[in-house]
Structure formats: structure tokens, C-alpha cells
Image (cartoon, coloured by chain):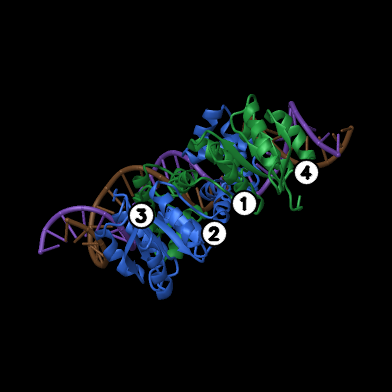
Chain colours: A green, B blue, C brown, D purple
Amino acid sequence: MSSSIIHIAIVEDDNEIRQTLQLIVDGSSGFACKHAFPDAESAITSIPDLPVDVVLMDIDLPGKSGIQATRELRRKCKSVDFIMLTVQSDDDSIFESLCAGASGYLLKDTNPAELLVHIKEVNDGGSPMSSQIARRIINSFRIIDNPLSERETEVLKLLSQGFNYKDVAEEVFLSPHTVKTHIKNIYSKLHVNNRAEAIYKAIKQKLI
Amino acid sequence: MSSSIIHIAIVEDDNEIRQTLQLIVDGSSGFACKHAFPDAESAITSIPDLPVDVVLMDIDLPGKSGIQATRELRRKCKSVDFIMLTVQSDDDSIFESLCAGASGYLLKDTNPAELLVHIKEVNDGGSPMSSQIARRIINSFRIIDNPLSERETEVLKLLSQGFNYKDVAEEVFLSPHTVKTHIKNIYSKLHVNNRAEAIYKAIKQKLI
DNA sequence: GTGACAATAGCTCCTTTGGGGTATTTTTTC
DNA sequence: GAAAAAATACCCCAAAGGAGCTATTGTCAC
């Protein structure tokens, strides 16, 4: 949809919240909300055929979760944006939602005026979230602590590109023996005993 | 610092912007800004000894970058929050800043009133960012597309834990030959030719 | 019902890897 | 200025890995 009115759909099991939300959104100028669903299943079957720009999705639904619904709907509706609107703010819910394709993540205590602003932001290509939610996401980027030396990190990065001893040695102008020593030290520092696990751990800890 | 006044430091090479920012922040009730630096080096030496709660950091500084300065200062000042305040909004700058330890990422066109709100948010444990910046971060969580079958994914996950052919075979009740075939197919699908690169690519593409 | 893909299993041959050592030099840190 | 950490280099050897093959079975879509 590219008209000036933003078309919203709501998926929320609590009747009162759903109806209140719909009234608020549909009653605001520039917004329309003609469709609201009490469960994931009905939303998944109906939304693909509706002219919807933004879906407000509750996570905790009876039966299929709002996260799963988002995952499935995104496959079919490439141009629809999803805002999770929920009471759950645990890390797992947040990251699963984002991986499922949600564009925004707001808590249910967001006030109506802000909610409308956020819907507009999503429609304009933004990703609104409360700054508390944002902090959790940002923290996931932080490096916990890096036991590797610069040289070791350099070697490990090359290994992750598929280089073998000899290739790495040539790349960094070292003897292959030295490269081997570095790798042994890397394994020892990361408490692993092969390349695969070293790379896995290094990435998970954001060392490379 | 835990007093009711939030103490700010500014690192910004443009004299006019730096002075204007300092005037705005220091002139607002609840905020104090007695320290402003034109480069990374002077900030790095001074800030650890100052009573600072939040640092506004420009990225593009002469000499050492604001990202590097953030990295170094965070090691010394565990309780200080950093907000990147910059014109650069490319993905690399954003992710490097977050990895370096920034808590917020705002563009320089943010208006003064909003800036103060955001400083407050950071100080309260939030992570303010424009919804455009947030979208980029969120997009980094998306799964692009998964060429691997379920079995292959399962095998690759085990490899990433450091399992060898035999271990994997025992774990999933298969012949080691079959495991080897799966691995070869994985390599072929991911266009790699060894374990290290396969795991690297798989993680980067969020396949495992 | 044919073609594509996934899952299974096997073979050979050669290269690479990782574990066990030892040892010197440079750089950093206290 | 001593101690610690990092970077450098080398040895042996058994185990693991990867390339290149073939082949059967089952499932799913068109």
C-alpha cells in the first residue's frame, strides 16, 4: 500500500485490548484499522489477502505464537511490516521476534499517541523500540572479553576464511611453524581442540 | 555518578558544534557539561579522572577515531555510557560503534530537546537510536535464505561443537560415510571447501 | 511417472591437522 | 630492570579431513 492512509491489522487475543486498540487506531486520522484477529491462525489465513501495511502482533497468543505467525506471514507478505506489541521483554522473545522478521518491538504500556508515531515510523522504514529494548539488543553486540593477542586474532580470521597453515603463513609473512604455534595457543586459550570449535566460539564471543 | 545531575563530556573536533553542544547541555537543568575535547587522545587521557556519566562522541575525529576512543575508554570507565553523535550512518560505523561499547547512536541532526531526552534515557539504562538506525540493526538479525536440509544443518551444528566424523556419526546414528557425504554436500552448497569456512559462513548467514 | 532432491552407504588416495615437545627474541607491564 | 606475555621457529607422528568417485532408497512436485 502506498496511499497516505496507513492500513493496520491487529492480532491480539484479549478482547478488550484488541477492541480498544482498534478503536484508537481506526479513529485516528491517517490510520485505518478494519481488521483485527484474536489468534495467529485466522491472521495467517486472512492477512495475505488484505491491503495491510503494518501488523500489530501480540506474542502470547493461544495456540500458535505471534512470533511464529510473524515468521509465516513475512514469507507471504513481503511489503508488510510487523510490530510486536507485548508485555514480554525477555531477551529470547526479542531476538526470536527480530529473527522472525519483526520491524519494531514495543511494550504494551506504550501510550496511544506514541504508538501512532511508532506505526508511522515503521511505515517510513524505521524500527521503533523502547530504549530499554534497544539496550538489550545493543548489549548483544558487546565483546565480553578477548583473551587472544592481535596476531592470534589475525590468524584465526584467516582460518575462518578457509586458509590452511601454509596459506596463512604466506599471507602474514611467517613460517608455517609459527602459524601452527599460534593456532595451538588459540586452541588452548579458547579451550577447544580443533578449528571448527575455535571458529564457532570466536564468533559467538565476537572475537572475529 | 549517581547524583540527580547528569554529567556530560563531549568529544567533537568541530569547534562550533562542540561549543554549541556544550552550551545547550550545560545550560539545561539537570545536566552539566564542564568538559569538552577536540580529539580522541585528550579525551582518553582526561575522561577516566573526571566525574562523567555520559560521553557524546563524534566518530570522525582527526587522528584516532571516536570508535577507537570509545573502545579504549570503556575499558577504563566501566560506568560511563557512550552516545555516538555523528553524520555517518553506514552499517560499518554503526556495528563497529556498538561492538566498541556505545550505548546509543544518534545522528547530528537530532534536535537539542530530543538530545537531552536521549541522554537521560542512556543514563537510565536505555539505548536511544533513531528508528532508521534501529532498522539497520534489526535487519542484521534477519535470515537471508537457507540452502541446507535439516540433516545437514544438524550435522553442521555438531561440527561447530568440535565433533569429528565419527563423533557425529555416533550422535545421529549414521554411518561415518554418510556423515562425510553430508559434509561434502554442505561444502558444495555453501561454496566452501573446508570446515572452518563452512562454519564461518553458516554463522554469518545464521544457518546455525 | 519422471525428475529432483534428500538421505543413506561405501571406496581410494593424498593432504592437512593437532598433540607432544623445545627454544630464542621482542614487547609489554609492573 | 625483572617478570610476563607475545611472537617467532623448528621437530616427529598418528589421526582426521577432503576430493573424487559410485550407488540405492524414499519422497515430493509437476
The x, y position of residue D26, in whole percent, is 74, 26
Residue A15 visible here: yes
The span from disc 4 to disc 3 (Cα, nearest Å) is: 47 Å
The residue mark sitting in front, 2 or 3, is: 3
Name the secondary structure under disc 1: helix
Name the secondary structure under disc 4: loop
Residue that label 4 marks: A51
The x, y position of residue C20, in whole percent, is 31, 43
- The kind of residue on which mark 2 rests is Asp
Q: Is residue A118 left or right of residue A130?
A: right
Badge 3 density bin: few <14, some 14–19, many ≥20, Cα 10 Å: some
Q: Is residue B72 above or below residue A105?
A: below
Residue that appears at 60% across and 49% down: A117
Residue that label 1 marks: A121
The residue mark sitting in front, 3 or 1, is: 3
Task: Indicate which disc, 2 or 3, sits on the residue closer to the N terminus.
Answer: 3
Name the secondary structure under disc 2: helix
- The kind of residue on which mark 3 rests is Gly
Q: Are marks 2 and 3 on the same chain?
A: yes
- The kind of residue on which mark 4 rests is Pro
- Foreground of the two, B29 or B33: B29
Residue that label 3 marks: B30
- Foreground of the two, A164 or B60: B60
The span from disc 2 to disc 1 (Cα, nearest Å) is: 19 Å
- Foreground of the two, B21 or A126: B21
The residue mark sitting in front, 4 or 3, is: 3
Q: Is residue A52 above or below residue B87?
A: above
- The kind of residue on which mark 1 rests is Glu
